[in-house]
Image (tube, rainbow, N blue to C red):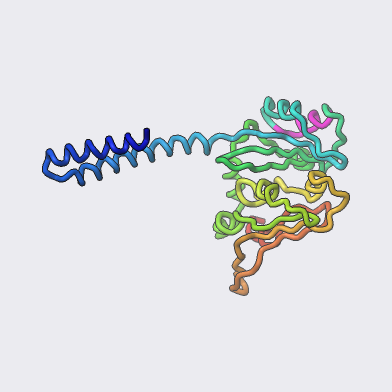
């Protein structure tokens, strides 16, 4: 059908072109350009609707003993207006899970055809943090970008956006790490949604962390030495979060 529709356009172009003694070429060009413009406008409308849709896929509660997820938890989160201290406590108590300052709620969501994660920990909400639902991703992203140090926005957009390798105890976790890198390529650091290493320990059911290693695809330009260097994150302690000195230097103090 598509092939015949193209022939139809070309035939009409030639007929009208010969009628006006122009051999059809100028008119065909105009028809093709018109068709391209229409298709572009349609695609822009479709892209707009996709880019502005944020859908929660699943929610997970994390404490010292559990990496807990089920459909009821997903339903509870989706009908909430906010995630704050009271909501956080209510959800943990509802599922009879112990809570401490490092207890976390992880939300996996899709946005612009990519899966990302947001981690919220109890200490964070106890200090007044509130996440409004449904998640306004553009607002969340903007708040994060506002915390980038002067002249460092390029790093987040073009350097921290690609990760080539990620392992924990020699287990390949590149897919999960790309989700954790998040909407701003910052592992939640810009919005203070830090990702504790102990969260990964529970997710992958490990007794201990020998080593978490993350290697970025792009080199980092060392401003002082004026040379390109490898950018890696290597962590071994439960209480640490996913961060590097390079990342921290690009965030406002």
Q: Is residue 140 left or right of residue 67?
A: left
Determine the image quadrant of residue 35.
top left
Which quarter of the image is occupied by the N terminus?
A: top left
- Name which residue lies at 29% across and 39% down: 34
In the image, is residue 91 part of the stretch drawn in magenta?
yes
In the displayed structure, 136 sits above or below 180; it is above
Q: Position of residue 52 (x, y in %)?
A: 53, 36
Q: How many marks?
A: 0
Determine the image quadrant of residue 166.
bottom right
Determine the image quadrant of residue 213.
bottom right
Q: Is residue 142 left or right of residue 89?
A: left
In the image, is residue 206 part of the stretch drawn in magenta?
no
- Name which residue lies at 76% across and 52% down: 241
Instruction: Give the residue at the far bottom of this rendering.
Output: 225
Q: What stretch is highlighted in magenta?
A: 83-93
- Name which residue lies at 83% across and 52% down: 238
Q: Position of residue 227 (x, y in %)?
A: 60, 73
Say which of 103 and 127 sits in front: 103
Q: Position of residue 155 (x, y in %)?
A: 58, 59
In the displayed structure, 164 sits above or below 123; it is below
Q: Is residue 251 left or right of residue 18?
A: right
Q: Position of residue 78 (x, y in %)?
A: 68, 28
Say which of 24 and 43 sits in front: 24
Res 88 seen here: yes
In the displayed structure, 62 sits above or below 146; it is above
- Name which residue lies at 68% across and 38% down: 108
State whether the magenta stretch is mostly helix, strand or loop. helix
């Amino acid at each position: 059908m598509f092939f015949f529709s193209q022939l139809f356009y070309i035939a009409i172009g030639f007929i009208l072109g010969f009628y006006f003694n122009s051999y059809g070429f100028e008119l065909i060009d105009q028809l093709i350009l018109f068709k391209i413009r229409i298709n572009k406008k349609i695609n822009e409308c479709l892209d707009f609707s996709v880019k502005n849709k944020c859908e929660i896929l699943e929610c997970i509660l994390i404490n010292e003993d559990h990496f807990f997820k089920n459909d009821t938890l997903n339903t509870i989160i989706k009908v909430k207006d906010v995630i704050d201290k009271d909501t956080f406590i209510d959800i943990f108590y509802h599922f009879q899970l112990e809570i401490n300052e490092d207890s976390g709620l992880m939300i996996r969501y899709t946005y612009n055809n990519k899966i990302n994660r947001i981690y919220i920990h109890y200490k964070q909400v106890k200090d007044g943090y509130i996440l409004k639902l449904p998640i306004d991703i553009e607002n969340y992203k903007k708040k994060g970008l506002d915390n980038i140090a002067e002249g460092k926005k390029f790093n987040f957009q073009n350097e921290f956006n690609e990760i080539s390798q990620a392992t924990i105890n020699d287990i390949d976790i590149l897919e999960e790490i790309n989700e954790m890198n998040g909407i701003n390529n910052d592992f939640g650091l810009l919005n203070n949604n830090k990702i504790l290493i102990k969260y990964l320990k529970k997710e992958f059911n490990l007794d201990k962390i020998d080593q978490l290693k993350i290697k970025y695809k792009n080199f980092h330009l060392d401003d002082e030495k004026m040379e390109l260097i490898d950018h890696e994150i290597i962590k071994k302690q439960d209480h640490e979060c996913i961060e590097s000195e390079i990342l921290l230097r690009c965030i406002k103090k």
